[in-house]
């Protein structure tokens, strides 16, 4: 298995939980400890993927019937999940809500036909000073990537699992299916982009730039190169979502991703209580008006 379907990617998040494979659907969860020795599970960050979505309900039922079941499961679905909203709601009866809209690309159409004129212009501007290449050995790029991502983390005050440790990156750069691109100018590397390929799908995992890379519009050169690279190699690309929950938002990230895409897909936040009695016990001292799921973790991201 490659990308988010692989054991290697699940193990890269081992600082945040113990990887648990779902045997029928082929997805992965992270089992986490809770107060009092209890455990629950979350989908892999940033998206939960599985090989056979039709078997996911059976996997959840197996977890429910375990001798010591997990308290709950929560995850964010793959935008290309092969289940409609009604089927997802059937699997996740306690929480299933539209979460974000991802900007996606259907590469049955050539990028030259849909990339915005604005983005084509800034690509030409960037290409005056920035070049892009495939990184043949991503694992050897670790030190440079750590520096690039440190700029991103500081710029956006990234914390928790989003921050990704150097240990996690050492593993992620060796995950089967990784494709990495480097943007550089006369001074050296100014940006990079990591993708995971899973069959006919490629997912934009992360991108990061130096301050000089932002000034040189290196992101335009990178995205232009990546779309051309994947054209006729895969059918679908996931560029990710905007910073907020509104796909019509006019913030910079939304405009940027919208200019490279030709379609959108919704992802869902989904949750299921596997042990109602223990769930209620853990929620006893929580604000019952909160919509957070699982409720006993309300405030954990503060």
Image: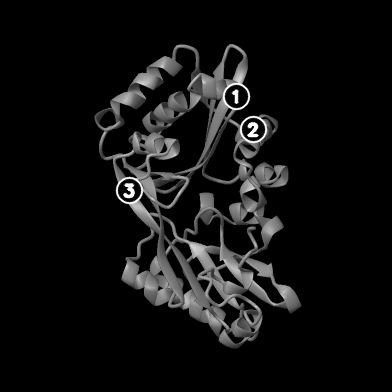
* Crowd band around label 1 with a 10 angstrom C-alpha radius: few (<14), some (14–19), many (20+): some
Q: Residue at x 58, y 65 (%)?
A: 42
Residue 279 location in percent, x, y? Answer: 60, 81
Q: Residue at x 48, y 22 (%)?
A: 217
Q: Nearer the viewer, residue 287 or 156?
A: 287
Above or below, comparing residue 24 to residue 191 in the picture: below
User: Answer yes or no: do the residues labelled 1 and 2 have beta carbons within 8 Å?
Assistant: yes
Residue 241 location in percent, x, y? Answer: 43, 47
**Residue 225 in which image quadrant:** top left
Cα distance in 3D space between marks 3 and 1: 30 Å
Q: Residue furthest right?
A: 36
Cα distance in 3D space between marks 1 and 2: 8 Å
**What element does badge 2 sit on?**
helix
**What element does badge 1 sit on?**
helix
From where the camera sits, is residue 80 visible? no
Q: Which residue is mark 2?
A: 151
Q: Which mark is residue 264?
A: 3
Q: Which mark is residue 211?
A: 1
Q: Nearer the viewer, residue 171 or 34?
A: 34
User: Answer yes or no: do the residues labelled 3 and 2 have beta carbons within 8 Å?
Assistant: no
18 with respect to 231 (left or right): right
Residue 262 location in percent, x, y? Answer: 29, 40
**Residue 84 in which image quadrant:** bottom left
Considering only order in the chain, which callout, 2 or 1, is on the residue closer to the N terminus? 2
Q: Residue at x 38, y 76 (%)?
A: 90
Q: Which mark is residue 154?
A: none
Q: Nearer the viewer, residue 130 or 4?
A: 130
């Amino acid at each position: 298995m490659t990308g988010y379907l692989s054991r290697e990617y699940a193990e890269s998040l081992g600082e945040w939980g113990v990887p648990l494979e779902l045997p029928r659907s082929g997805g992965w969860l992270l089992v986490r400890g809770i107060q009092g020795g209890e455990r629950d599970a979350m989908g892999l960050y940033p998206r939960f993927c599985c090989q056979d979505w039709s078997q996911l309900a059976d996997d959840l039922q197996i977890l429910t019937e375990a001798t010591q079941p997990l308290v709950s499961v929560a995850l964010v679905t793959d935008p290309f999940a092969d289940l409609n909203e009604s089927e997802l709601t059937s699997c996740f009866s306690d929480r299933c809500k539209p979460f974000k809209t991802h900007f996606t690309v259907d590469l049955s159409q050539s990028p030259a036909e849909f990339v915005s004129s604005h983005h084509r212009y800034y690509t030409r501007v960037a290409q005056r000073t920035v070049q892009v290449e495939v990184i043949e050995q991503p694992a050897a790029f670790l030190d440079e990537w750590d520096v690039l991502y440190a700029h991103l983390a500081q710029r956006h005050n990234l914390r928790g699992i989003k921050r990704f440790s150097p240990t996690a990156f050492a593993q992620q750069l060796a995950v089967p299916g990784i494709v990495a691109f480097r943007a550089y100018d006369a001074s050296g590397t100014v940006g990079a982009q990591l993708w995971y390929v899973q069959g006919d799908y490629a997912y934009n995992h992360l991108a990061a730039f130096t301050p000089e890379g932002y000034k040189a519009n290196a992101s335009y050169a990178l995205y232009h190169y990546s779309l051309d690279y994947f054209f006729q190699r895969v059918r679908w690309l996931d560029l990710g979502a905007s910073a907020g929950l509104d796909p019509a938002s006019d913030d910079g990230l939304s405009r940027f991703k919208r200019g490279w895409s030709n379609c959108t897909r919704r992802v869902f936040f989904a949750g299921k209580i596997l042990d109602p009695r223990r769930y209620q016990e853990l929620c006893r001292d929580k604000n019952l008006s909160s919509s957070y799921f699982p409720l006993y973790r309300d405030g954990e991201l503060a």
